[in-house]
């Protein structure tokens, strides 16, 4: 078992990573709760809800609310339904919400916890590789049809309990989605970490020890950034490397048509290409592209209109005065934000999509 403590301006919480720790969940609760609501999805509910319930204190009243699996559930309708469930189950300000699932569940359940009675405790129990990123840092949100995560808050959990036994059997699509964020952490932090990840076959030869090592390093990268800039006023923006185009692709295709990580992977390729042209440098564009292709990432996306993608990118949370702000790289471990004009962005994006499809 490995523990990292995240300390921010608003609170402190532990991220516990290890195998079989769902069986010890009651040991990691920061206090005694008499009313607990587990929020999960239709897939994870069948796999893990009973195990979590069994290992919570017997004195607590425990209920479960289930939403359909998939990014489409990060919606205002499901959010409102879960608030209603919290009321019906008589949660009060001393109650606990447990987010059991991947990044979608963490964001959705966290936003419910952040806004129910002006905020109650919640715990993240991630069950995907992708959630090693989303479960740390306190960002909670739901989507709007016009953009991803546009409705949300900064609201840290009181603990993150990450049982790696839930990860090894994930389908390849979910492994790809999660490892895009692992690669991102390598690009913005450390050459050796990045090189190690790009040497890893994540579909057929992913071993538990290697996975845990990568997750711990990725969490450490994010923790270091979040502790310095909890509410994204400065360097936390660097964690959005690849996300400006990635979010636009997700929104334009329709949530759930492509996974978050698969979209971010394409966004990272674009950000690297823009970085090379902007700073006249050479970055590992082809090693990343080769790794993505080897591991089955969908790079031949349906034909998308450049103008619509640019408009989506202008609605990104980092944009200022309707000008797209992208996270670029001056080198591995040297992220920087740059404002990109509409015309320059359109030209760069048109060339990139043409090359990607060729």
Image: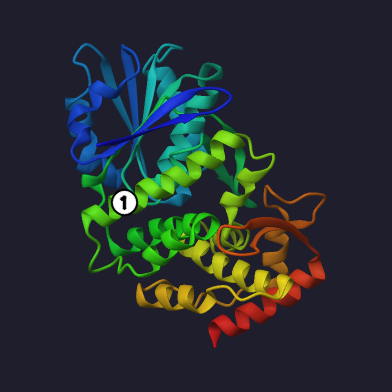
Q: Residue at x 68, y 42 (%)?
A: 234
Q: Quadrant of the C terminus?
A: bottom right
As drawn, the residue found furthest toward the bottom would be 358
Q: For the residue carrying disc 1, how many other residues have a C-alpha within 10 Å: few (<14), some (14-19), or many (20+)?
A: few
Q: Quadrant of residue 10?
A: top right
Residue 68 versus residue 286: which sits nearer the camera? 286
Q: Is residue 315 above or below residue 40?
A: below
Q: Quadrant of residue 135?
A: top left
Q: Is residue 123 above or below residue 342?
A: above
Q: Is residue 127 above or below residue 51?
A: below
Q: Residue at x 49, y 44 (%)?
A: 222
Q: Residue 133: x, y in percent?
A: 45, 46
Q: Residue 339: x, y in percent?
A: 77, 58
Left or right of 218 on screen, residue 277: right
Taking the image as drawn, is residue 281 in sight? yes
Q: Residue 171: x, y in percent?
A: 27, 60
Q: Quadrant of the N terminus?
A: top left
Q: Which residue is mark 1?
A: 213
């Amino acid at each position: 078992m490995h523990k990292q403590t995240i300390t921010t301006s608003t609170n402190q919480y532990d991220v516990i990573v290890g195998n079989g720790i769902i069986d010890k969940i009651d040991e990691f609760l920061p206090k005694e709760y008499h009313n607990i609501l587990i929020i999960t999805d239709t897939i994870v509910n069948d796999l893990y809800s009973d195990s979590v319930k069994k290992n919570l204190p017997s004195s607590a009243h425990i209920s479960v609310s289930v939403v359909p699996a998939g990014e489409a559930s990060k919606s205002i309708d499901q959010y409102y339904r879960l608030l209603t469930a919290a009321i019906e189950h008589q949660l009060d300000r001393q109650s606990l919400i447990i987010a059991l699932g991947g990044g979608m569940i963490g964001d959705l359940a966290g936003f419910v916890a952040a806004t129910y009675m002006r905020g109650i405790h919640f715990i993240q129990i991630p069950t995907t590789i992708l959630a090693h990123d989303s479960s740390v840092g306190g960002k909670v949100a739901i989507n709007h049809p016009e953009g991803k995560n546009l409705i949300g808050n900064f609201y840290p959990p009181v603990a993150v309990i990450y049982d790696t036994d839930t990860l090894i059997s994930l389908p390849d699509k979910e492994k790809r989605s999660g490892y895009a964020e692992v690669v991102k952490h390598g690009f913005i932090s450390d050459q050796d970490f990045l090189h190690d990840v790009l040497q890893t076959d994540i579909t057929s030869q992913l071993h538990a020890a290697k996975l845990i090592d990568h997750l711990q390093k990725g969490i450490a990268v994010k923790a270091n950034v979040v502790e310095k800039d909890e509410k994204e006023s400065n360097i936390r923006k660097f964690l959005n490397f690849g996300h400006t185009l990635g979010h636009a692709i997700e929104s334009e295709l329709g949530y759930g048509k492509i996974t978050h990580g698969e979209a971010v992977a394409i966004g990272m390729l674009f950000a690297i290409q823009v970085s090379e042209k902007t700073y006249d440098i050479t970055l590992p564009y082809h090693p990343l592209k080769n790794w993505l292709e080897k591991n089955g990432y969908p790079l031949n996306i349906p034909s998308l209109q450049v103008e619509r993608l640019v408009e989506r990118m202008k609605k990104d949370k980092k944009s200022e005065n309707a000008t797209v702000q992208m996270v670029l790289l001056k080198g591995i471990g040297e992220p920087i934000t740059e404002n990109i004009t509409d015309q320059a962005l359109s030209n760069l994006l048109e060339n990139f999509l043409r090359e990607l499809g060729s």
